[in-house]
Image: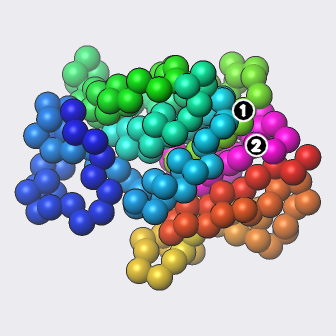
Amino acid sequence: MQTPEHEDIPGLYRRLRHPLFAWIGLRPIFAQHTRAEHEALQRWVRGRKTVVEIGVAEGGSAFALRQAMPPNGALYLIDPYHLSRIRWLNALRRAAHACVRVSNNGRVVWVEEFSAQAAAKWNDTIDFILFDGDHAEEAVRSDWRAWHGFLRPGGVAAFHDARVFLGGWPAVSDGPVKLVDGLFRQNQPSEWNIVDEVHSLVIVQRSV
């Protein structure tokens, strides 16, 4: 299994879009974040033991988080992997598992459920959570409502595809952008502060 490809993906790999080709090793994992975002995720997850990612896809960001999290930490990866036409094959899920296995740091727990289902069963505090699931506005808001209460004081939430930047892909109408703008820029709640912004990634931290 090759490690994720971040930017400037060669044309040959672009023609091998299906995750089957990543699973069998004909191309690297397509990370859905830039190298700068990769480095920011790793910078903010260091020292944080209970880590959650919502929306895993091929596992590029999960790989980044696992590499940098504490050796005694736990990484919970939440994705239903429900879109495969052949459930037992599910190349996207297999590619993600193979990618995350490249690192043996920490403990990984796969939760193959929708975000709301997983949140209903959750009963632990969280040190770091990455929101990168369904990007529809109501889905992003639902994820935030379901999960933000579990973040401990000082805990960090990262939102991907949540910031418009020069040369980037997000638009002001995108769900993550609207959520971040509405919650943390226009209202500026005292409990949450934007502490970092890198390309489309926005990092907020709980102050109390």
Q: Is residue 60 above or below residue 90?
A: below
> Which type of secondary structure does the marked residue at label 1 adopt?
strand
Q: Is residue 1 left or right of residue 168?
A: left
Amino acid tagged 1? Ile
* Residue assigned mark 2: 155
Looking at the rendered structure, the secondary structure element under dot 2 is strand
Image coords of residue 176 (percent x, y):
59, 59
Is the residue marked by circle 1 packed among few (<14), some (14-19), or many (20+) residues within 10 Å? many
Q: Where does the magenta region start and end? A: 133-159
Q: Is residue 105 magenta?
A: no
State the residue at coordinates (14%, 35%).
25
Q: Is residue 2 left or right of residue 146?
A: left
Q: Quadrant of residue 142?
A: top right
Residue 126, labelled with which disc? 1
Residue 34 in the image: x percent, y percent? 40, 61
Distance, label 1 to label 2, CA atoms, is 7 Å
- Report whether residue 113 is seen: no
Which residue corresponds to the image point at 60% horizontal and 25% vertical from the top-left?
Answer: 73
Q: Residue at x 14, y 31 (%)?
A: 24
